[in-house]
Image (cartoon, grey):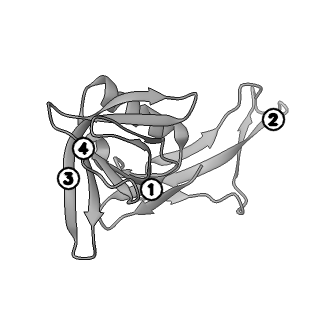
Amino acid sequence: FMVRPNMANNLRVSDNLREILRLLKKMQQNGFKVTVWQQMGSNGTRLISHAYIHNINIADKSLAVKPFGQKKFNFDKKLSIYIHGDEQSLLFKTHANFNSRQLIVFNIPREIRLLEKRGEPRINIHEKLHNEVVFEKSQGFKDKLNQYTYVCNDISQGGFGFRIFSHD
């Protein structure tokens, strides 16, 4: 997966599906409000509705939102829809697979923008770079060293992240 930082406003973009699903499920379980809108024309006018996440279907990779209260959606099926949630300032753009006045269904986003919780900048390690982390473990002074090699994901001032697979 890839994480691109934007340190100017402490936002980042993530395409980590686990992270995306975790945030969406948390918002659904807690009934958090999401703001749904469309840009209507070149003058910047927005058609805005408030909604909640009604259903997350992992099997068909879809997400459904319903409007709050007795309100109804009035979106154009041909235009992009923007979704914003207060949970980590989640934001993504999508197109509706199904659009009615009571329900909008769209694909679970492949990429989201969200608020970075870290205080220090994160340095992303790209797959093209040499990104191995080697740990050496010994029992005594003259014992043979055991080496363990893992793939490094990112580095920040407070530490680094690396992958450990179950067979390691």
In what element is the residue under mark 2? loop
In front: mark 4 or mark 3? Answer: 4
Image coords of residue 97 (percent x, y): 47, 44
Instruction: Determine the CA span between mark 3 and mark 2.
Output: 62 Å
**Residue at image mark 3:** 48
How busy is the neighbourhood of tag 4: few (under 14 within 10 Å), some, or many (20 plus)?
many
In what element is the residue under mark 1? strand
- Exactly how many numbered labels are in the figure? 4
**Which residue in the rendered view is the most extreme toward the bottom?**
42
Q: Earlier in the sequence, mark 4 or mark 1?
A: 1
Name the kind of residue labelled 3 in the image: Ile
Mark 4 and mark 2 in contact? Answer it, CB < 8 Å. Answer: no
In front: mark 4 or mark 1? Answer: 4
Name the kind of residue labelled 2 in the image: Leu
**Residue at image mark 2:** 145
Q: Is residue 87 above or below residue 7?
A: above
Q: Which mark is residue 13?
A: 1
In front: mark 2 or mark 1? Answer: 1
Instruction: Determine the CA span between mark 4 and mark 1.
Output: 28 Å
**Which residue in the rendered view is the most extreme toward the right?**
144
Mark 4 and mark 1 in contact? Answer it, CB < 8 Å. Answer: no
